[in-house]
Amino acid sequence: MGRLYKSVALIEAAEPANLDELIASGLGRFVVRRLGPTAAVVDHARLDEMHKLLKQLGQTPRIAPE
Amino acid sequence: MPDATVPAAALVASRLELLSFAALKRVAKTLGLPGASKREHLAEQLAHFLGTPAHLDVLKKRLIPRDWSVLSLLPLRLGPFRQHVLVGALRERGASRADALAQIERLLALGCVLCATQLYNANNRFTIDQDMLRLGGGNFWFDLTPGVGQWAAERNPSKPGLGAVAAPASASESRLAELQRAAFILLAEASRKPIRLTTKGLPYKTEIGRLAGALAGEPTTPARGAKKGSKKRASAEAPPVLWFAFAALIGAHLLRPDEAESAAIADAGTFLTESPAQQVWQLVSGWLNGPFDDLSRVATLTRSYAPDEESIPWIPADAGYYGGPDLDSLARARALIVEVLRLVTTPRPEAWYALDDFARLAYDQNHEMLFRHATDLEFLAERGYDLGPGDGFLPGSRSERQPYFGVRRATDGSPLYLDEDWPEVEGAYVRQVCVESLSWLGLVEVGPAGGAPDRFRLTPLGRHLLLGKPLPAPSDDADDADGRAVVQPNYEVIVLDALANIPLVAQLDAFAERRGLDRAAIFHLRQADLIRGMDHGWTGPRILEVLEQANGGPLPQNVAYTLNEWIAQYERLAIHERATLLEADDAAQLDGWLADAKIAPLLGKRLGPTTALVPAANATALARLLATRKTPVDLVDYAAPASGVLRLQDPDLIELDAANAEPYLAYRLEGFATPAAPDGRTLRYQISRDSIERGAEKGWTGARLVAFLEAASGEGIPIDLYTRLIGWSGALPAPAYEPLVAVSLPSEILDWYTLRELAPIGRLIRGVPSARLALVAPGDLDALRDELAARGLALHPATLPAEALDKETDDELDDYADDDALVDVTEILRRALIGPGAPPGTSKILPLFGGPRRRPPR
């Protein structure tokens, strides 16, 4: 049976290499599961922590409107 | 001008409702209309006649010049007017007192004037006769029939007029630039962060400081290199133009108060991209209806009972209570001034006019433009009553001077009196409006410059907006947006003529740091502001396009390179913080959904072999649609934590039915536990020292672990599992031990509490867990033996029975439990260390980390 997940936090990269690099640089601990080469579900309860890490890594992600 | 909010026909119908049947019949008969047997039919007939060309034809034959003269001036009052106003206007035109009443009666019967007074209740309606007019004592309210005022104005040759005066040697230009800056700053700042308001609708002092600082040209963010915690900028005073702009924006609904947020939110729409003329027209409308207090700007006046914010030119909600005009009075006064301005400048739009003459003319149109006057009681009624001014007005005493209520001279606080001191009140008000408010709005310029201006004329913008004259053609090609700014290699963007390029300034403000706004606007391109702009919908290409067009050519190479880098970095990564995700059982199922004509439009982007994004608005419809296809989906909401899906087993096991397994739950469990071999359809996770320590590194504290497991299991945590979680997570300090000897005194008549009072014995005792049990250090045992022996108590070694150690403790705990007293947790733990099992009464213990805990079976 399929599932519809709500209130999910996702990270989506333009290229697989971008996401791979971030996961290797520490983002991995927030990744719940990888959905595909460029997308992963992340821990919605630790978004602040994750944003802090991304900022330390020099990233400026777009916050997608829902 | 304020727009009519009630359609004309509806207004007429509502006014006719106030008239008696006899009055309606009289109007119909006077106008030569056929009668009707029922009131409602007659009212409907009149409602469809009054204000029509047929009505005008009748009035042309029946009204005399004096009628048209009076009727043409009443619209200047904007809205209903009192009877004594009409009487006063007629008397000024030569009518006697008796004639004036008769004329009013006739105007009512001809349907030019409508009754606007509700008499007591619906059973009492207004009749058209002089007895009724006398009954009101001048306080009845009336309205002009829609259209009559305009007909009268067209027919009345004697419109208000002024003679022109010589031009001044020098003139002050209009101050529109100040208002434009202030309005832009307010909207820009409110867009970034809503302006927080007090319960009185005024910005907080900190907000005033922010806005005033921005208006004064202070950078919106700390300059590059400023240290954190460096000296705060001094709070700037808010200049009057800021209040004027704020009030006008509120009045024009461009700043919208949000009661829930207690803030003003920018709702400017396309305002900043409109032409200056369109912007000013909206601001005029906002000023007319807004809460700016022009009267408080008259320096020669002071309010007698001013509220605390006297220095703020703002009309509070309870204005009028303290004396002085309220919001409606000021709105009508402003509208009167603007309308008279339009009338007097029509013959000679470019002429200069004397301010004093204009003030007198405006005042003559309505002596009650700001303050109500007492009626002419000797004429209208034999009794008098307090009509507003509260200084002992006596009926019939026409010689009594009536003071202005709530306004005094600023120099010495002396009172001012209606009619005789009008130049200092209404006159000063009209002059103030011309010199300041209308100048800010760009409608007039005044002269001479540098001193007390005494004359004015309309600006080209004023002639355009008030008289419909065309605006002078712009000197440059308005369609050519090139070269209005300079983008410099140091990332600064300078807009050369800021106020003539407000739309461009507004665009730059959306994605650049505003460093200054005066004649020129200075912006700085920074990554953080670029991101801010892109977060609000700006795309990278659009930002580059605006900059290149404004620059009139390509950007400096380093600037272009950096901007492209920042844009690429922003677009490289996206975070969805509250997304909806559809997961299929396999890739083929998702392929099918994406190809389905009805399902596909509800889906967003595919993220992986089996997952696709779903716009949040489509989630419910999608779930329903899939259910109809016999492929229902489970709904999992991460905002609602899983509950009752785990089973906790002592000493270290967590179980989960495979049907309840989902990735986020697995992720959390694997954060502090290790997957163990499943048992059929039951997944298992095991905690260990290593796994808990690993979890602690990821932020799984003891408290967090307990909270999560209790919520996810929906029950208490078994004691051993609980203890291991707490112990391995490092939540408790290491327990300490000390070898002690337990000495029992099984007696009902003597206990250790008593013996401990004896100093030689008391100093040997380490602790007294209960009345019958004492704890002694091994080295003190001999000394205790001697002391006891000296008192006839022979100490001997024995194996103390369990009840000597536990039973009394249990009893005491039960006593505590019965008394509902707080139990000393450390005491219980200490007792537990010297006996097996947890003592009863555990349920009464205040848990360390919250939630119930299960006791092991006995």
Image (cartoon, rainbow, N blue to C red):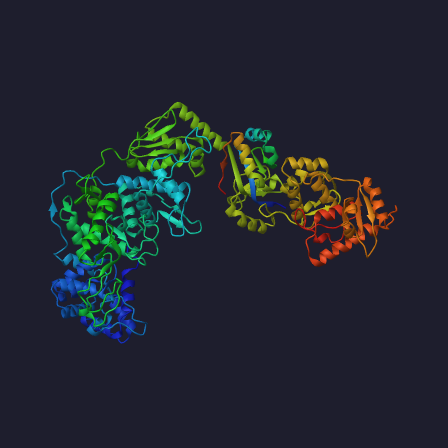
Residue drawn at 64 percent across, 43 percent down? B704
> Is residue B338 visible to us here?
no
Q: Nearer the viewer, residue B4 or B522?
A: B522
Q: Nearer the viewer, residue B186 or B75?
A: B186
| Residue B631 image point, x, y percent | 61, 48
In this rendering, position of residue B224 left or right of residue B680: left
Residue at far top of view: B557
Q: Nearer the viewer, residue B121 or B832?
A: B832
> Is residue B363 visible to us here?
yes
User: Where is residue B537, by image quadrant?
Assistant: top left
Residue B387, compared with residue B235, is above or below; it is: below
In this rendering, position of residue B3 left or right of residue A29: left
User: Where is residue B682, by image quadrant?
Assistant: top right
In this rendering, position of residue B741 left or right of residue B303: right
Total numbered circles: 0
| Residue B127 image point, x, y percent | 24, 73
Residue drawn at 60 percent across, 49 percent down? B632
In this rendering, position of residue B446 left or right of residue B250: left
User: Where is residue A20, by image quadrant?
Assistant: top right
Q: Nearer the viewer, residue B727 or B442?
A: B727
| Residue B525 image point, x, y percent | 40, 30
| Residue B226 image point, x, y percent | 43, 30
